[in-house]
């Protein structure tokens, strides 16, 4: 009698499940690494410091059409503003947007076009500056210098 060698492998269903599981695992690991780097470079602050407290001043206006808010911000102060964070309000419902890095020198205007779910009634604008801390440059959002702008 002759012995048969039966080569059994994994079924196609199990192979598919293993491949999907491995792909999701790799995605989660990469996402965690990238998120950690991005979040550590943005620091939210309640105060930007003595220099910015006296010389950071912005004004703004916005229009909205087709769920795109066009926000114009003017830097009226003496300090370069590195970017802005926007919070859109429709009634009492607020929707935040990630900070935008849009350097604006004193006396200049910055025009930001942002997609929104629905056109807001008002917008809170928070200026941000770059601070050197522990040898690293961090974008700091100045919560104490926010302005509120109503639609025109």
Image (cartoon, rainbow, N blue to C red):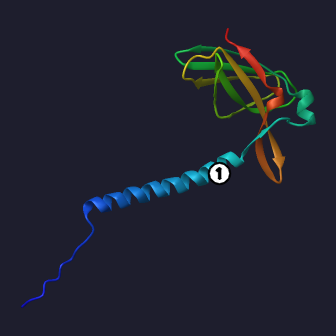
Of all residues, the one furthest to the bottom in this rendering is 1
Which quadrant, please, contains the C terminus?
top right
How many discs mark residues in the rendered view?
1
- On screen, residue 76 versus residue 69, left or right, reads right
Residue 148 appears in view: yes
Q: Is residue 118 left or right of residue 92?
A: left
Q: Quadrant of the N terminus?
A: bottom left
Q: Quadrant of residue 131?
A: top right
Q: From the viewer's perspective, is 144 left or right of 5?
A: right
Write the residue at 25% across / 71% down: 9
Q: Residue at x 72, y 46 (%)?
A: 41
Q: Residue furthest front?
A: 92
Can the viewer see residue 60 in this picture? no
Give the residue drawn at x 68%, y 27%: 86
- Compared to residue 22, the image places residue 39 above or below, namely above
Residue at left offset 70%, top offset 30%: 85
Above or below for 126 versus 123: below
Rendered location of residue 129, percent (x, y):
79, 36
Q: Nearer the viewer, residue 108 or 1?
A: 1
Identify the residue at the far left of this view: 1
* Image coordinates for residue 151, horizontal then vertical, percent: 67, 11
Element type at mark 1: helix
Question: Could you tell me residue 25's position as x and y percent?
Answer: 48, 57
Neighbor class of circle 1 (other Cα within 10 Å; few <14, some 14-19, many 20+) is: few
Viewer-nearest residue: 54 or 27: 27
**Toward the viewer: 30 or 113?**
30
Q: Is residue 123 above or below residue 19?
A: above
Q: Is residue 9 above or below residue 132?
A: below
Per the image, the residue denoted by label 1 is 36
């Amino acid at each position: 009698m002759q012995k048969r060698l039966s080569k059994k492998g994994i079924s196609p269903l199990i192979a598919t499940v293993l491949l999907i599981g491995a792909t999701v695992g790799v995605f989660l690991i990469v996402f965690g690494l990238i998120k950690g780097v991005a979040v550590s470079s943005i620091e939210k602050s309640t105060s930007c410091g003595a220099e910015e407290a006296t010389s950071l001043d912005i004004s703004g206006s916005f229009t909205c059409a087709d769920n795109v808010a066009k926000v114009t911000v003017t830097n009226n102060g003496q300090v370069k503003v590195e970017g802005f964070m926007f919070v859109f309000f429709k009634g009492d419902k607020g929707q935040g947007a990630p900070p935008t890095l849009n350097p604006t020198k004193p006396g200049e205007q910055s025009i930001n076009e942002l997609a929104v779910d629905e056109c807001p009634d008002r917008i809170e604008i928070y200026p941000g500056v770059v601070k050197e801390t522990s040898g690293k440059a961090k974008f700091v959002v100045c919560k104490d210098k926010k302005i509120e702008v109503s639609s025109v």
